[in-house]
Amino acid sequence: MKLEQATADVELSHEGKVVRLKALLDTGASASIITKRLADELGVFIPLKEPYELRTADKDGRLRIIGMCRVGVVFQGAEVPGGAVFEVAENLRGDVELVIGRPEIDKWDIVFTPGGPRPRKVPIEFEII
């Protein structure tokens, strides 16, 4: 898969603050992660009493999770009802500010196309089966 097929235009918002960026979609990630810098910019950082680490696919790779946040999300032009909760990492790779992992990919029903990822259905709807 080419990089442009695994990135998406995302808009994050909170109380009038809006940030537009490219997010990396990672089907192998068990969590969705945002940088501390971006969480601070939006004013949504909630620190954890006990930070923890997530292992990554790199040999010695570990992400230090120091908090969480809830933000409004528009994914490829489609609003995500209720927004999303992201884990906040202090050491996410420098060229990536937002990783959308498998839980959100499944919940938002994202499909991967030659033109890039997109919601299968707009508006995005959730199901409890």
Image (cartoon, helix red, strand yellow):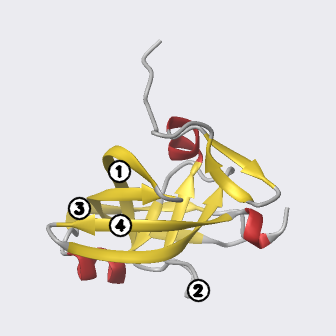
Q: Nearer the viewer, mark 4 or mark 3?
A: 4
Q: Amino acid at mark 2?
A: Asp
- What x and y, as percent, mark residue 36? 34, 78
Alpha carbons under labels 4 and 3: distance apart: 21 Å
Kindly state the secondary structure of the residue where label 4 is placed: strand
Task: Say whether disc 2 or disc 4 marks the residue closer to the N-terminus.
Answer: 4
Spatial CA distance of label 3 from label 2 is 24 Å
Cβ atoms under marks 3 and 2 closer than 8 Å: no
Q: Disc 1 versus disc 4: distance between alpha carbons?
A: 9 Å
Left or right, residue 66 beside residue 53: left
Query: Do the CB atoms of the residues marked 3 and 1 lie less than 8 Å apart?
Result: no
How far is disc 1 from disc 2 in space, using C-alphas? 22 Å
Q: Which residue is mark 2?
A: 95
* Mark 3 vs mark 1, CA separation in Å: 17 Å
Name the residue beneath numbered marker 3: 48
In this view, the mark in front (1 or 4) = 4
Which numbered tag is attached to residue 68?
none
Picture residue at 45% right of the left edge, 39% below the top = 123
